[in-house]
Every structure is written in structure tokens, then in C-alpha cells.
Image (cartoon, helix red, strand yellow):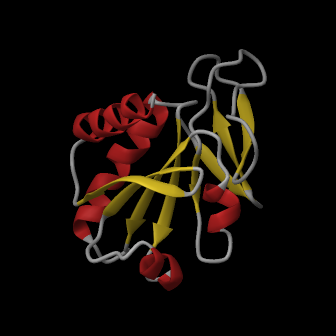
Amino acid sequence: MSTVTTSRSKTVVCESCGRKNRVPAAGDGRPKCGNCGTPLPWIVDAGDDDFAEIAGKAAPLVLVDLWATWCGPCRKVSPALEQVARELAGKIKLVKVDVDQAPGLSQRFQVQAVPTLLLLDRGEAIARQAGAAPANVLRQWVEETIAGRR
């Protein structure tokens, strides 16, 4: 998957048909390929000013990655989180938050260590995990949380 950031949206190439699609940072519903209808991964950055718009009202569960640029484990887990977002396209939205750029969110979610991962359902934290883990472990954590919500 390749992405190019444009103002408040990303261009995502559909892994099924190869068509380019614009995916907004915020919006209703779940992004799908305009050509074949395949769910698209929804991966965006957010900060103090736009977090509520981007993550607070999203329909799918939101996986929040609270990370820092200086954090080695954060850099290690980032590709695993993006893999999970691709594998669970249509079921989750990945929102990445740099804690150094978003002190209000760090305080709101009482971040003690990075990376801290949260699962939100319409803005409410329903699960929390600290530290890096491989993609299969992260996916299992997300899927178990989703299953527990049914």
C-alpha cells in the first residue's frame, strides 16, 4: 500500500484492484475503494486540535497509537500497527498521536510510557495496552476486544 498525504486526506492504493482512492482524515462510515468496494485501511495522524474530530466520532473502533519520535519501541511497533490496520480494514481506524506534539491528549489518557495503545469506541477507551508487540499479538488483542463488544 502506498499513501501520499494531501490536505486532510491521504491517497491510498487499493490492494485488491490497484485503484487510487482519497481517504479523508475524518468522516462518517468506513472507507471503501470506489472501484471494487474493498475496505481500505484508515490510517491518520491527529493532535490536540483535531483528535475529537478524527477519532471521537469514528464509526469503526479506533486504535490509538500514542508514541514519540525518540522512542525506539514506538518506531518498531509502527509498521506492525499499520499491518493490523490493513488486515482489519473496515473494522478499525488507526490514529497515530505524537505525545510530544499533543500534551493534552497525553494528559487526558494518562500516558505514563510510550508506546501506549488504546482502543476507543466513539471516543470512550475500552481497552489499553502499553509497550510494543508483534503484529499477530496486536491483531489478536484488537479482535478479542471487538468480539467482547458484541
Q: How many marks?
A: 0
Against 112, residue 8 (above or below) is above
Between residues 10 and 84, which one lies in front from this camera angle?
A: 84
Which residue is found at the position 64% from the left and 41% from the top? 59
Q: Is residue 101 visible?
A: no
Q: Residue 97, how many percent across, how many down?
A: 49, 67
Q: Residue 66, how many percent across, how many down?
A: 40, 66
Against 31, residue 46 (above or below) is below
Which residue is found at the position 38% from the left and 46% from the top? 81
Q: Residue 118, how many percent across, how many down?
A: 39, 56
**97 sits left or right of 58 in the view:** left
**55 sits left or right of 86 in the view:** right
If the image is split into quadrants, where does the C terminus sit?
A: top left
Q: Is residue 62 visible?
A: yes
Against 65, residue 60 (above or below) is above
Which residue is found at the position 72% from the left and 32% from the top? 20
**128 sits left or right of 16 in the view:** left
Between residues 71 and 66, which one lies in front from this camera angle?
A: 66
Q: Residue 30, how many percent across, how many down?
A: 67, 34
Which residue is found at the position 65% from the left and 50% from the top? 4
Indicate the quadrant where residue 41 lies.
Answer: top right
